[in-house]
């Protein structure tokens, strides 16, 4: 008998790996005849690399890079030596959390550090890059990333401009590097275009300090217009091009990347469907199960896979919205946070709360598998 634990992270408290390990400890004691398969999942945002390394047995590579305000930092990415494949998260270099000590200024924020991580992986011999682009601090259309990879952004005097949004009004010409990039897959679960009322600037800019929408729209439009002319590539309207402040657009334009569903990409990479098929019971979850979960989040993807293969599926989450449509996807669903407990305390105690909930759920899980009656 086999249990597959395929949970996402509890954001702000437990990584997907920590969730899986905590549940495994309880289930190993309570169901000793079951084999436990740990398969942390992610949707392309923070935690993607750790989930894939845990599931595939990869290794961490540390590299020197820059944060979104070009301060030197060390960042990690995942490396699968047998496949010559790298797994990166742009948030590891250009993430909003890394510049929380500074005033927000998206006119200066750059994806250059993400490009440097990509360059390190390419120089290591990567034949494929998988990039999660959630949690960005930037709104530069991938300008800094492209500069780090060797693109030249020139003004009217053929002088290089500093690759930040504040200087894009000076841009007159783009010169590509004489290199061939490896296959690049981008995990992206939003459908925003680069520009317009539903684009990168208006939808995601305010959380990065953007107040003058026209300033950014004008500059990103100029970048897209010149790139279309000089590079013959114009994906500005493709859904997802506005993800991560336009990094989705930049990766497609400058690197020939392909944007794919984060959950679909990760599940394919870690062989999730095959592992679901082999299991007798599936356990999934995330920090909160609610209406947003129904729109392609990881736990619903896992639950749908489980249903296709006729497997029982159980969810553990920090909290669960009282929604019949949501609960219908799970045979059992448990909220680990007591209703009276403040959220801040629940975040601190998440591991203990999860373990306690799993212990209490054991009788029902056994009954679900026909191992014992519910007391």
Image: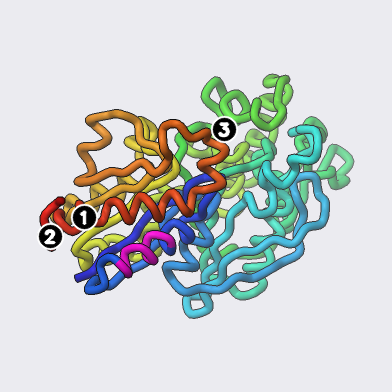
Q: Position of residue 141 (x, y in %)?
A: 65, 39
Q: Quadrant of residue 148?
A: bottom right
Residue at image mark 1? 363
Instruction: Determine which of the numbered discs, if any, sits on residue 372 in the image.
Output: 2
Quadrant of the frame with the N terminus: bottom left
Q: Secondary structure at mark 2?
A: loop
Residue in the image at 78% along x and 58% along y? 73
Labels 1 & 2 near each other (Cβ < 8 A): yes
Q: Is residue 277 left or right of 245 when viewed as pictured?
A: left
Whether 142 is drawn above or below 267: the answer is above
Q: How many angstroms separate mark 3 from mark 1 (CA)?
A: 50 Å
Residue in the image at 68% along x and 55% along y? 115
Is residue 237 visible in the rendered image? The answer is no
Check disc 2: other Cα within 10 Å, few if <14, some if 14-19, many if 20+: few
Query: First in sequence: mark 3 or mark 2?
Result: 3
| Residue 26 highlighted magenta (yes or no) | yes
Residue at image mark 3? 194
Whether 137 is drawn above or below 131: the answer is above
Q: From the image, state whether disc 3 or disc 2 is nearer to you.
A: 2
Q: Is residue 28 left or right of 128 when viewed as pictured?
A: left
Residue in the image at 17% along x and 52% along y? 308
Q: From the image, state whether disc 3 or disc 1 is nearer to you.
A: 1
Query: First in sequence: mark 1 or mark 2?
Result: 1
Check disc 1: other Cα within 10 Å, few if <14, some if 14-19, many if 20+: some
Q: Secondary structure at mark 3?
A: loop
Q: Is residue 106 left or right of 309 when viewed as pictured?
A: right
């Amino acid at each position: 008998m086999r249990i597959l634990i395929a949970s996402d992270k509890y954001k702000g408290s437990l990584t997907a790996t920590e969730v899986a390990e905590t549940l495994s400890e309880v289930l190993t004691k309570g169901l000793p005849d079951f084999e436990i398969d740990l398969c942390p999942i992610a949707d392309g945002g923070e935690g993607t690399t750790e989930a894939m390394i845990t599931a595939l047995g990869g290794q961490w590579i540390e590299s020197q890079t820059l944060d979104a305000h070009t301060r030197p930092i060390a960042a990690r990415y995942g490396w699968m030596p047998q496949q010559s494949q790298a797994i990166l998260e742009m948030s590891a270099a250009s993430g909003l959390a890394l510049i929380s000590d500074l005033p927000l200024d998206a006119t200066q924020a750059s994806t250059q550090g993400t490009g440097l991580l990509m360059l390190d992986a390419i120089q290591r011999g990567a034949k494929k890059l998988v990039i999660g682009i959630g949690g960005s601090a930037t709104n530069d259309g991938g300008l800094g990333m492209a500069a780090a990879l060797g693109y030249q952004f020139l003004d009217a005097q053929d002088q290089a401009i500093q690759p930040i949004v504040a200087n894009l009004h000076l841009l007159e010409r783009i010169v590509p590097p004489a290199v061939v990039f490896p296959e690049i897959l981008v995990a992206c679960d939003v459908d925003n275009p680069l520009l317009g009322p539903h684009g990168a600037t208006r939808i995601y800019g305010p959380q990065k300090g953007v107040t003058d929408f026209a300033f950014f729209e004008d500059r990103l439009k100029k970048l897209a217009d010149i790139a279309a002319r000089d590079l013959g590539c114009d994906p500005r309207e493709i859904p997802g091009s506005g993800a991560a402040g336009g990094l989705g657009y930049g990766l497609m334009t400058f690197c020939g990347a392909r944007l794919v569903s984060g959950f679909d990409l990760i599940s394919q990479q870690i062989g999730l469907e095959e592992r679901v098929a082999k299991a007798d019971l599936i356990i999934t979850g995330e920090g909160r199960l609610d209406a947003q979960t129904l729109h392609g989040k990881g736990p619903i993807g896992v639950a749908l896979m489980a249903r296709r293969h006729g497997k029982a599926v159980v969810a553990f989450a920090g909290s669960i919205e009282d929604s019949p449509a949501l609960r219908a996807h799970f045979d059992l669903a448990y909220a680990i946070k007591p209703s009276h407990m403040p959220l801040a305390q629940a975040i601190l105690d998440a591991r203990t709360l999860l373990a306690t909930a799993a212990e209490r759920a054991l009788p029902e899980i056994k009954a679900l598998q026909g191992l014992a009656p519910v007391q």
